[in-house]
Image (cartoon, coloured by chain):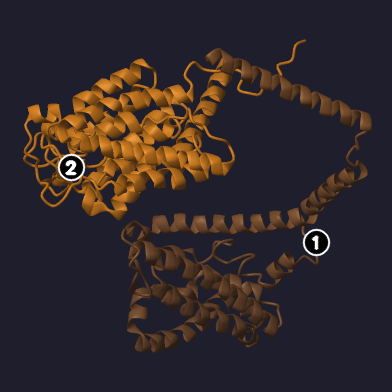
Chain colours: A brown, B orange
Amino acid sequence: MKMSKNNWYRRFLLATKGIFLQNPILTLGLALPFAVVACTSLQTAVGLSIGALMALIPAALLLPYVMKWIPQQLQWLDYPICALLSAVFLMPTRLITGSLSPALMDSVGVYFSLFCVSSLLFTVKEKCKEKEPVRALLTLIRMWLGVVLVLVLMGCIREVLGYGTIWNKPLTFMKIRFSGVMVSGLGFILLGFLAALGKKLHRTILSVQFWLRDGWPKLKAKVAGIFEKNEKEPKKIMDEKELIHEEESAEQLVEQITETVLGKEQDNK
Amino acid sequence: MKMNAKPFPYIRAEERSPMLMLDTAIALIPPFFMACFYYGMRSLAVGAFTVIAAVAANWISDLCSGRGLEWWDASPVVTGMIIALLMPASVPYYIPIIAALFAIFVVKFPYGGTGHNLFNPAAAGLAFVTLCFGDQLANYPIPLETLPMTVDETVKLTQGAASLLKMGAIPTISMEQLALGNFAGPMGTTNILVIAACLIYLLIRRNVKWYVPLTYLATISLFASRVHHENLSAAESIIVELVAGSLMFVAVYMLTEPVTLPKRPMGKVLYAMTAAVITMLFRYYGVVLNSAVFALLLTNAFTPLFDRLVEQGHIVERSVTGSEDE
């Protein structure tokens, strides 16, 4: 199924590339440990999102400028330098967030710092390598939003199912707790289902669009054809002879019925 | 020349999948009767609810996938019966129902339904509820004390023999009790003689290859004879290990599931041996209950590997024999 260039859905997907189209976690399979192992509640999801923001965006934006100072022979050092830059921004963020909300940092644990050596950082770095700063920033923000979307979804679902709470507030309708969803194996299954759900949603939108484009005009034409046919073939107007014949036959039928009914009554008497 | 216009398969075996599943379902009825004898009508109610949930989930999956209703498919019945028989008779009704729904909706349906599942659905369902509701599955009612339909705190529950073994203790059960299945445990797995009789039925019906359960149990026996408790002799250790948990049940009904088994006999033997070794490692070093079920799930992931290994072995063998003939 191909979409036309002016299709609103196509334009929407391209404008949000990185969030829905080519999502870093669901489609590209990056930063899986964060989503599958660490992200067990909404609070953790928020903590990880802050970590991703501070680890990815400044490091990927500043790296090209820093690399200009590095001699040509040492350009292969871009990966460790990117990790170092990321760590430089992560450390103060960890301290500030930890002092503001210790519970948030406790829930994230060691995974907060692991962003500076994750595959997500290096993929983002490569994507923004030869882009203008504004374009690079937009790409980074879109990719970060894609990560946040999946982390928040995973965190919400696992917290509701596993603890029966949302942001540590108990939900009264959750009587049964599925504590097994906290296990990373089931986290993988949940992530797989999210990916499948996304794909199903995409296909449903596409099929609805194509039905509106191809199927709906056909249906409209078909219905219009039926009406036109009815208009072209008006109801037959009966002749006088036919009317008289029909009336006679009806009278005969009534007579037959009355005779049979009367006959039965006499038999009963 | 007359062309065969029918779709494949052109050669059909006598054993069809509905008949295979029906035979397995028939072989699962005697353990249910024994559970009814030991724990009362509640065990049958647990079984009925689980089977209904599994069948309903399967029908919904069939309708959602657009295949149409396959009402003759008895595989969800087997899945439901296996799940119920691996539960304590005192289990709350919702737990086996959740296990059955997980087995069908998460493990069976996404892989393509009956005949396509990569993992044993019943084992996966049971593993899920063990992880979620492990505390409620760890204690078992005492046999021959008829359970009320709604279990409350007045019902006496004890630890199973497998749990005791895991903690390093030796279960004090006489040989007579072991043979009769008169000890606390999952409601369908303690009746060893009944399960053995069902195995014979399945062997006669050619539903099960004899070497699969035999290899599994032999490997476990070998393991148990080598690594055992100080106060137990090798023979006692073998008997206790084989009878205490759900090993026999898993060996007869779950390990021999045709969908998850490798294709060739050598692959099946390797599969059974691996399952046995992982089971014993889980028993000795693991923390979760139902180690045989978790081991089976892990072994299911190796099935394509066994198939490939054996196939490559055959290719090498053929090339060697071919060169010798020349």
Q: Which residue is mark 1?
A: A4
Residue A196 horizontal/vertical position (percent): 56, 55
Q: Is residue A230 above or below residue B182?
A: below
Q: Residue at image x 64%, y 78%?
A: A73
Dot 1 falls on which chain? A
* Residue at x 34% of width, y 57% of height: A180
Depth check, front residue: B127 or B155: B155
* Three-letter residue code for mark 1: Ser
Quadrant occupied by the C terminus of chain B: top right
Query: Is there CB contact under 8 Å for labels 2 and 1?
Result: no
Name the amino acid, label 2: Ala
Viewed as shown, does residue B5 lie left or right of A28? Answer: right
Question: The N terminus of chain B lies in which quarter of the figure?
Answer: top right
The image shows residue B140 at horizontal and vertical percentages of 16, 44
**Label 2: how many Cα within 10 Å (few below 14, some 14–19, many 20+):** many
Q: Work out whether disc 2 and disc 1 sit on a shared chain.
A: no
Q: Secondary structure at mark 1?
A: loop
Name the image quarter holding residue B187: top left
Q: Which residue is mark 2?
A: B162
Q: Is residue A166 visible?
A: yes
Residue at x-position 51% and y-position 24%: B317
Q: Is residue B274 visible?
A: no
